[in-house]
Image: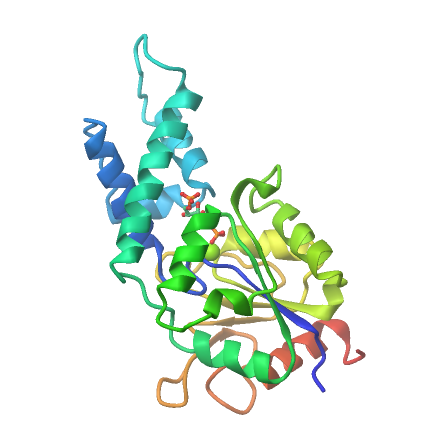
Amino acid sequence: MHRFKALIFDVDGTLADTERDGHRPAFNAAFADAGLDWFWDEPLYGELLAVTGGRERILYFMAHAGIRLGAGPDPDAFARELHRAKTRHYLQRLESGAIPLRPGVLRLLREARAAGIRLAIATTTTPENVDTLLDRAGVPGLRGWFETICAGESVPRKKPAPDIYDLALERLGLAARDCVAVEDSDNGARAALEAGLRALLITVNDYTLGQDFGAAPLVVDGLGEPDQPARALSGSLGARPWVDLDTLDLIHDSVHGGSV
Ligand code: XBP
Ligand code: MG
């Protein structure tokens, strides 16, 4: 018997390293298609990730890079159209099988299913992006493992606002203390914590290493595998150098005091 009933996963940076070789080149391809000379290199993209949501990220860039559109469409409409093109490019990249799940993800999902733990997704990205990532991950039926996929603009405010986690909890019909959240970024951590998800596991990547994850009880450099150990950057992994359901029970106990 585990301490929690459901696991709620972020997608970008958590289930897969989608940003560097997925979203970033898709933005650049959309810019090139539109005849723009904008280019988001890795360091710049790392800074722009502070703004969640691709359309919002484009709007922020336009406002801060001193870009003027002249007498064309208004900036919101312009960003929306550019973002649509970006989504098309991103989906093409996924269709060609470019982005695998991070190590340990499939193992943990399988363990959770075997133990009757319910699965959900709470992400900022566009819903089609999640569906295609899961459908192309090489695991038949993977998308259906998730009872609810809460994504993109189905809530008014994106992360770091708690809205998408509130929606996931509502759809699951569970209280925050019945769930464990898995995130990779400071914005994601703020969203989860604000929604009351104190049993929060952070699995960092190159873009998010060194960020401030607030009161998250465990930060690791990956979920790890028996032959690919994970490292705890703060908190304790417990007996084994990878994240399993027992590790998640430990972090649940550490914030909820061991009562179910
Ligand atoms: C992910 C994001 C998304 C993606 C781009 O944040 O910020 O904006 O970078 O996706 P999180 P879209 O992992 O915290 O959910 O372009 O589809 O918005
Ligand atoms: Mg993320």
89, above or below 2, in the image: above
60, above or below 86, in the image: above
Quarter of the image where one finds residue 260: bottom right
223, above or below 161, in the image: below
Quarter of the image for the N terminus: give it. bottom right
- Side of 195 where 30 appears, left or right: left
83, above or below 258, in the image: above
| x and y, in percent, of residue 245 in the image | 59, 82
Badge count: 0
Quarter of the image where one finds residue 39: top left
- Side of 140 where 178 appears, left or right: right
How was this image coloured?
A: rainbow
| x and y, in percent, of residue 23 in the image | 33, 48
| x and y, in percent, of residue 126 in the image | 46, 46
Residue visible at 45% across and 41% down in the picture: 51
Residue visible at 35% across and 71% down in the picture: 138
- Side of 205 where 237 appears, left or right: right
Residue closer to the observer: 176 or 66: 176
Residue visible at 61% across and 51% down in the picture: 191
Residue closer to the observer: 195 or 78: 78
